[in-house]
Image (spheres, rainbow, N blue to C red):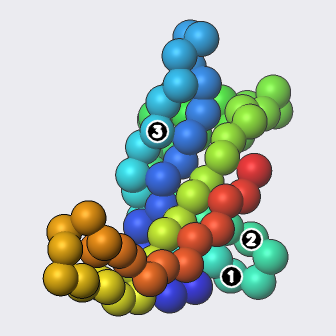
Amino acid sequence: DEGSVCHLGFVRDGAPVVLPTLYTRIGDHLYVHGSTGSRPLRSAGDGTGLPVCVTVTHVDALVLARSAFHHSLNYRSVVAH
């Protein structure tokens, strides 16, 4: 709930596609921003369904070290499908 950008993944014409977009969650429902004219949203709403995967990553902090090889991130993420 702290993020605002998600990545929406699906397969189109046999190839994987991942789109960054805005999202919000209200209760148990996830809403993604997009045009009703877009192919993925039309497919998702036409009754045939479109299997999708949604990912969100929230970066909490950079972890800096003396060596560039040891830099890291503290983060939280979720994957829903």
Question: Which residue reaches farthest front?
Answer: 67
Between label 3 and label 2, give the one nearer the viewer.
Answer: 3
Q: Secondary structure at mark 3?
A: strand
Discs 1, 3 touching: Cβ within 8 Å: no
* Crowd class of label 2 (few under 14; some 14 to 19; many from 20; radius 10 Å): few
- Residue 42, position as x, y percentages in the image: 60, 33
Could you tell me residue 7's position as x and y percent? 48, 53
Quarter that holds the N terminus:
bottom right
- In this rendering, the answer to whether 40 lies above or below 76 is above
Label 2 residue SS: strand
What's the distance in space between the residues labelled 1 and 3, CA to CA? 23 Å
| Depth check, front residue: 32 or 56 | 56
44, 13: nearer the viewer:
13
Pointer 1 or 3: first along the chain: 3
Tag 3: amino acid? Val
Asked whether disc 1 touches disc 2, contact meaning CB atoms under 8 Å apart, the reply is yes
User: Hey, what amino acid is under mark 1?
Assistant: Ile
Q: Residue at x 19, y 69 (%)?
A: 68
> Left or right of 65: which side holds 26?
right
Residue placed farthest to the top in the image?
A: 13
Q: Label 2, on which residue?
A: 29
Query: Where residue 18 is drawn, which disc sits there?
Result: 3
Residue 3 at least partly seen = no
* Residue at the image point whose x is 49% and y is 69% from the top: 57
Q: Quadrant of residue 14?
A: top right
Task: Provide the residue designation for mark 1.
Answer: 26
Three-letter code, disc 2: His
